[in-house]
Amino acid sequence: MKIEINLLEIMHEDGETVKEAIYRQVTEQLLEWTKKDVAEQVKSCINREVGKIVAAAVAEETPKLVQGVLDAEFTPTSQWGYKSEPTTFRKELLKSFTEQMVYKVDDCGRVTNTYSRAVKEIIDGQVATFKKEFNSLITANLMRQAFAHAEKALTDRLREQAGLK
């Protein structure tokens, strides 16, 4: 904290002693700093408390608001002005999800919607895992059979050559 004293003010004050002028300037500066500090603290406390109140209100009211929006009834109108049966956002979302949850592949074998892509990714992953495990089992079994056959063929040949057969 820095206190500044204006000497020009002290020299031009009429009827005020030097001690009184210095005391007045120091108290004015301290009072100004205190006002600013108190104002900043009050502002900070108010902002903190208002933030807590607003956050609590938003947390409490958001589910009610979302429920209200989902259950609010409206009448869909086409671009030509034809009105459909009244419905709610919840019903329309359910209808849209139900329509999208159909596995579709076009004539060229391309996946056409998000649900189909997700199902295809899962199936492709499981098929790849199965293929890897199947190939490792077949390879191991094939090797075992090949070694058994080779061992038997070598044994038979050695017996033939040794005249044991």
Image (cartoon, grey):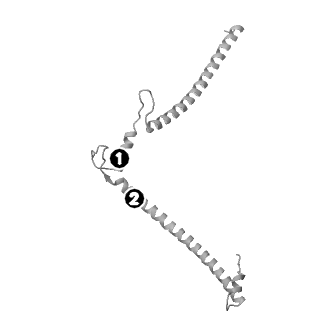
Mark 1 residue type:
Glu
- Residue drawn at point x = 37 percent, y = 53 percent: 70
Query: Residue 104 appears at what percent x and percent y?
Result: 41, 33
Q: In the drawing, does residue 22 fall left or right of residue 39?
A: right
Neighbour tally class for label 1: few under 14, some 14-19, many 20 plus, Cα within 10 Å? few
Q: Secondary structure at mark 1?
A: helix
Query: Residue 148 appears at what percent x and percent y?
Result: 63, 19
Q: Secondary structure at mark 2?
A: helix
Residue 152's place in the image compared with 83, above or below, is above
For the N terminus, give its image quadrant: bottom right
Residue 96, picture quadrant: top left
- Tell me if residue 9 can be seen: yes
Q: Mark 2 and mark 1: span between their CA atoms? A: 18 Å
Mark 2 residue type:
Leu
Query: Residue 127 appears at what percent x and percent y?
Result: 51, 31
The residue indicated by pointer 1 is: 92
Residue 128's place in the image compared with 54, above or below, is above
Q: Earlier in the sequence, mark 2 or mark 1?
A: 2
Report the disc number at residue 45: none
- Residue drawn at point x = 51 percent, y = 66 percent: 51
Report the disc number at residue 65: 2
- Residue drawn at point x = 55 percent, y = 32 percent: 129
